[in-house]
Amino acid sequence: MQPPKTSLAKRVPRRSHPTPPLGSRFTPNELLCRFRKALPAQVLSAWLPLASQGFYQRAFSLRIILWYFIFQRLGPDHTLSKALADALAGGADRLSPCGKPLSRQLRSVATTSLSDARQRLPLEVLLEALKHSARQIRSWVQGSQWLGWNVALLDGTTFRLRPHNDIAQEFPPHRSGKNKSPYWCLVRVVVAFCLNTGLLLNCALGPAKLSEQALAAQLLAVTWLKTLFIADRNFGVHSVVRAAQTASAQILVRLTLSRATKLAREAKLRLKAGLDAQMFWKPSSHDQCPEGLTRDAVPGRLLVLRVQRPGFRSLLLYLFTTLADIHAYPAAALAQLYGQRWQVELNLRYVKTEMDLGALECKSAEIARKEWLAGLLAYNLIRSVMGGGGGPGANPSLDPLLQPRAPVLSGLATARGQPVPSQSPVLGKTSGSRGQLSPPPTA
């Protein structure tokens, strides 16, 4: 008697043990637990009506596809084969419907089914998942506000793509001005990080021809209640300040000397150290207005502070803020708060190096967007584990990664002749100390 014929698809032997731990001190199971807690299945399903494309459930359900997008960014091997091997070993069986484990439904080592599933996942679900994960994890942290405000750090960066298929049309190669034709396609990104927890709150991306100011206006197109944005001189323009005002948020930005001089001249003020005056920022004929917004004047304060640091020359710091109450938000406290803006530079460095998002190997612009958002989601999950974000009452100070860096200004700035208080409203410790900031675990 001959044995029964087998399927043409190659059978895969089952492994009794799950995938080995990632190249870090966290295992996939630890991060999967945070994923299940931060992104319940019913929440993900509620975002499907927002998608421009339909979605149908198969063996790779919505939650499983999202998890394996994240899983691919957690290790050094970002291939589909690695993700499929974990699925065959039962790594995502806890995300499957009851009685239908994914590992029992897969019959082949071919990555076609997983690749098709990645194509089906709506981009809108990934974006909403990123924003929801930040809100959920931040709700587990106590004392994450500064004088009643959620402080968000605004900054921009770029990442590279190879010019495959439609990528060159969506994100044209960056021309450096040299004779040789460029190869790499460049994607410009503007992100918002939570100052206290380090979580990535939201992002906006587009081609390199779009300015960071325009992307910032896109990011601020939604409502940001009880949020105070901090940004450097690149965002110290009327369009960004106006967008923040429309989003029901407050903003603290640094100004260039030329822009501060112009604002002081229009307000008939003398630009000198110690200045703290209320004014209206009126747009000039050269200021661009974001789409859907009117060119209205923005009320706020113009501040000039002299910064003194041991061993360095003093410098003048020009700031504009929409926090109009001088007594509730003194210039010294605002100067110290702005000094912590440098934390966003460190966060971006970790995202691009540890999450390996500096250059993505993708075949389409749509997948490139999804890979980037998945990497940010993975970053937030690692933040939640390192901060002990397992539930209410957790504190990010449990790990040095989540402790904001000591202010660059070192608490030695003087505003209106008064030294900056040594007690930081955010850190709750002397601002002159420098916390040892350890990088995230190597993924």
Image (tube, grey):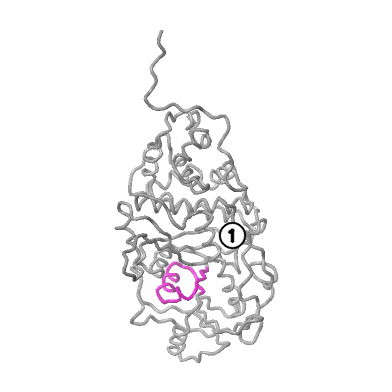
Rendered residue at 55%/50% (across/down):
443
Give the camera-side residue of 373 and 423: 373
Rendered residue at 33%/52% (across/down):
164
- The reply, left or right, for residue 17 in relation to residue 83 is right
> Which residue in the structure is indicated by mark 1?
197
Q: How many marks?
A: 1
Rendered residue at 60%/68% (across/down):
146
Quarter of the image where the N terminus is located: top left
Q: Position of residue 87 (x, y in %)?
A: 49, 36
Image: 336 above or below 45: below
Image: 265 above or below 432: below
- The reply, left or right, for residue 198 in relation to residue 393 is left
Q: Secondary structure at mark 1?
A: loop
Q: Amino acid at mark 1?
A: Thr
Q: Position of residue 326 (x, y in %)?
A: 57, 80
* Magenta stretch contains residue 331: no
Mark 1 surroundings within 10 Å by alpha-carbon count, few (fewer than 14), some (14 through 19), many (20 or more):
many
Q: Position of residue 83 (x, y in %)?
A: 47, 40
Q: Position of residue 371 (x, y in %)?
A: 43, 51
| Image quadrant in which you'd find residue 338 | bottom right
Write down the region rendered in magenta.
228-252
Of all residues, the one furthest to the front in this rendering is: 180
Give the camera-side residue of 183 and 285: 183
* Magenta stretch contains residue 249: yes
